[in-house]
Amino acid sequence: MAPQTPEELISSLVANMAFMLLIAAVCGYMLYHSEREAKRLLTTKKAWHPNRPIADEPAALRRHRLQLIILYSVFLTIALLVVIKDFMVILELKNRSLVAPQEQQASVSEQTGSGGHQAEPVVKPADPASVTDTTHAQPSRPSRPRQQARIDPDKAAIVLVPGGTFWMGISDDERDRAIEDCKTELTKHAASCTGWVLTEQPRHQVTLDPFSLDPYEVTNRQFERFVQATGYQTTAEKKGTAEVRVAGQGWQETKGVTWRHPEAGPDVFASGRAEHPVVNVSWHDAEAYCRWAGKRLPTEAEFEYATRAGTQTIYWWGNFSPGTRQVANVADESARTILPVILAGYDDGYLTTAPVGSYEANPFGLFDMTGNVAEWTADWYDGLYYRKSPERNPTGPSSGDSRMIRGGGWNDAASGIRPTSRGGGVPTKRDTRTGFRCAQDRSK
């Protein structure tokens, strides 16, 4: 059976190198022995064939040595080819680990999907006593949901984001912590965490021109206006299914789930969720809405830049979990019964989505760039893109199988809500944890 793991491949490589050295030793010994035999025959003037002149013997011996050289050269070539093959397989396996989100997150496709980070493990509802806390902050008392006046996204002015240069991706210092957080949060996929986080490297400088960005995620009310004006049918409505979190089964493709009926339950307007972010929308749906609105989806680089908002810390509010500060809708105390990992001591007041603008804006005046719902961006997904990304206004690969998802959602904890965290989903992916907002070139 061909080796499948890095350990098996390395063992095979060592064995093949030992085989190659053995053949080289045997070859050298035989050549040395042949040379000694030639000298012995010439000095004793004995021939293999008594009737053949002695002068012919060196030619016969040279042919003998040439045959030995050819024979053992073949053995050495075979051994060397096997070693080269193992090296190539190891390199390929390493590359595949760097693009793991397209394989494991895979099912970022129609089956498991990712809300902007990794595909979440299928788990049973956790007993509160057994829930793992992933927080680097000191334990704090759960806070109350933030009360604020109702905002009107339709009347909110689009935010002018200044151009600038920033460091995109994760630093070496932050990388190790991110990997450990990921392993804690996604125990069933812990082996893939290193590969996932490494897609955020190398850290590199990016310069962006000024652009504009919606301050809020697109709401159900806004999306309804688009549907009424165009008669548009979403991917979920055409396919008849979308992903929701089912108790005891994780994320499952479920019939009757659409943007209007997020859990195949009450209409979003009848249940008072008109100002919640629209979900169960595919990349195609998001792109169609933004185009109708005279805008576009933000690029991956624009999204990370806008999320960081000029800060240098891990999160825009600091290096640790928020404690009692109401900054984002993420996996919190209220989710102890349905999510395997939460931010201990933090309570954002909502089990799933929250009305847009319910939490603090970042320094650029943008809301919910972290949490609430993960968001579609314009770029194709490529786990190795940072190795070749242009420095100015990168727009992602020219083609691919999945589109980039950023920001993390209500179901993500410490690792998934980092501004550098990358995830992908096939363009038809739709679930209750992914939405979008629109961007616009500054000149428009």
Image (cartoon, grey):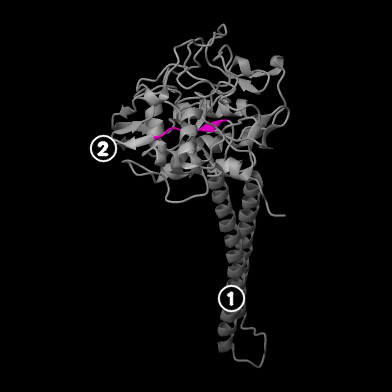
Residue at left offset 36%, top offset 25%? 309
Pinpoint residue 332: horizontal percent, then vertical percent.
Answer: 58, 17
Query: In this rendering, is residue 225 above or below 383?
Result: above
Is residue 219 visible in the rendered image? The answer is no
Q: Quick check: 30 left or right of 176?
A: right
Give how far apart the Cα atoms at labels 2 and 1 are.
79 Å
Pinpoint residue 107: horizontal percent, then vertical percent.
Answer: 62, 42
Q: Residue furthest left?
A: 443
Which disc, if any, is residue 65? Answer: 1
Pinpoint residue 373: horizontal percent, then vertical percent.
Answer: 52, 28
Pointer 2 residue: 443
Residue at left offset 30%, top offset 32%? 165
Which disc, if any, is residue 26? Answer: none
Place residue 73 in its image quadrant.
bottom right
Of helix, strand and loop, which mostly describes the magenta segment?
Answer: loop
Is residue 171 visible in the rendered image? The answer is yes
Stretch of the chain drawn in magenta: 433-438
Residue at left offset 40%, top offset 42%? 291
Query: In this rendering, is residue 184 above or below 66?
Result: above
Q: Earlier in the sequence, mark 2 or mark 1?
A: 1
Q: Nearer the viewer, residue 380 or 77?
A: 380
Q: Nearer the viewer, residue 428 or 288?
A: 288
> Callout 2: few (<14), some (14-19), or many (20+) C-alpha neighbours within 10 Å?
few
Q: Nearer the viewer, residue 361 or 400?
A: 361
Q: Looking at numbered disc 2 in the image, what kind of residue is underneath it?
A: Ser
